[in-house]
Amino acid sequence: MTYYTLGKFTPYSPTGDNPNNILFLKNKDGKDFYELQKTNLLGDAFFVVDSSNKVVAADVDFSKLFPENLTVIAGEGEVDALNDYQSGLDSELNYYMWNGTAIIRNIPSNSEWLEHYLLKIDEIHAGILRVSVDTATSEEQNTWPSKVEAANASLNGIATAQQETLLTDEASAFTPVRTVVELANIIIEKSNAYLNCIGKAAAFKQQAQRVLSQSENQNEAKGLIETLQTNADTLAASLAV
């Protein structure tokens, strides 16, 4: 396999009129992207790589690519990488990249795929908590501790004037109007439900991390993550506050 680079293509404005506002690209040698398409470019496959040298697009037809602020690598000869890339074998972990001399497949080490899927578990855990708080904004969530404190104080007859005002104002805004006692009980009930969410989500995360660390290979870990996501969705639905 023989490779050569066509360089990085960046936008530029050619002289003359451009009534259709066409975006023009040229490489570091000043060669226009569209003009290059008219030449007999050597290459059985063309790979577009980003700033990290990861392949983000590939085709046998150079004209089907549009490498804005990206680099194009041409390859002569049979290109297995192109077939694999186009058949969907590319993924977050297993991807093709340009190493300076060839297009190669990145195969993650055990520590790399483990770290990747541990981060997935963090995302799944965060997703459980997001569902459990429904549409509450972070600003609204910041008020919850004060409301719980006021509710507990009111029910125990030790609320300050400010705490009673907080509860009275919110209770009066409901239709039909709620009493302070009714609102306080609702706040406590929701608080207990949310604490239950936090506990179960944390337990889910710890168990998931433990099981993942016992995975023997990447495929097993990937399958586990898919199962965990399904289980997490079920758990989150049952914990919605």
Image: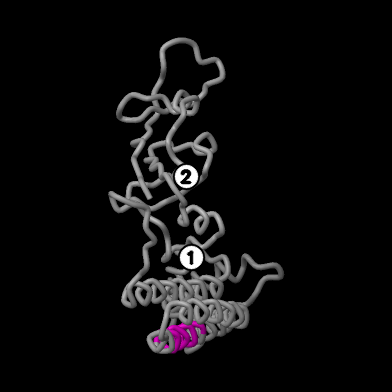
* First of labels 1, 2 by sequence position: 2
Amino acid type indicated by mark 2:
Ala
Residue 26 sits in quarter? top left
- The location of residue 93, given as percent across then percent down, is 41, 66
Would you say residue 52 sits in the magenta stretch? Answer: no
Q: Which residues are magenta?
A: 197-209
Residue at x 67% of width, y 71% of height: 177
The residue that appears at 47% across and 75% down in the rendered structure is 147
Residue 209 image offset from top left, x and y in percent = 40, 84
Residue 241 in view: no
Q: Residues within 10 Å of mark 1 (few under 14, many from 20)?
A: few
State the image coordinates of residue 157 (x, y, percent, origin top left): 47, 87
- Residue 2's place in the image compared with 156, above or below, is above
Q: How far across and down, in percent of the image, does residue 199 sit?
A: 46, 87
Residue drawn at (50%, 56%) of the image: 85
Q: CA distance from mark 1 to mark 2?
A: 54 Å
Q: Amino acid at mark 1?
A: Glu
Residue farthest to the right? 176
Q: Nearer the viewer, residue 154 or 133?
A: 133
Residue located beneath label 2 in the image: 45
Q: Could you say which is closer to the camera, residue 133 or residue 215?
A: 215
Q: Residue at x 51, y 72 (%)?
A: 127
Mark 1 sits on what residue? 140
Tell me if I can see residue 42 in this picture. Answer: yes
Image position of 162 with respect to 24: above or below:
below
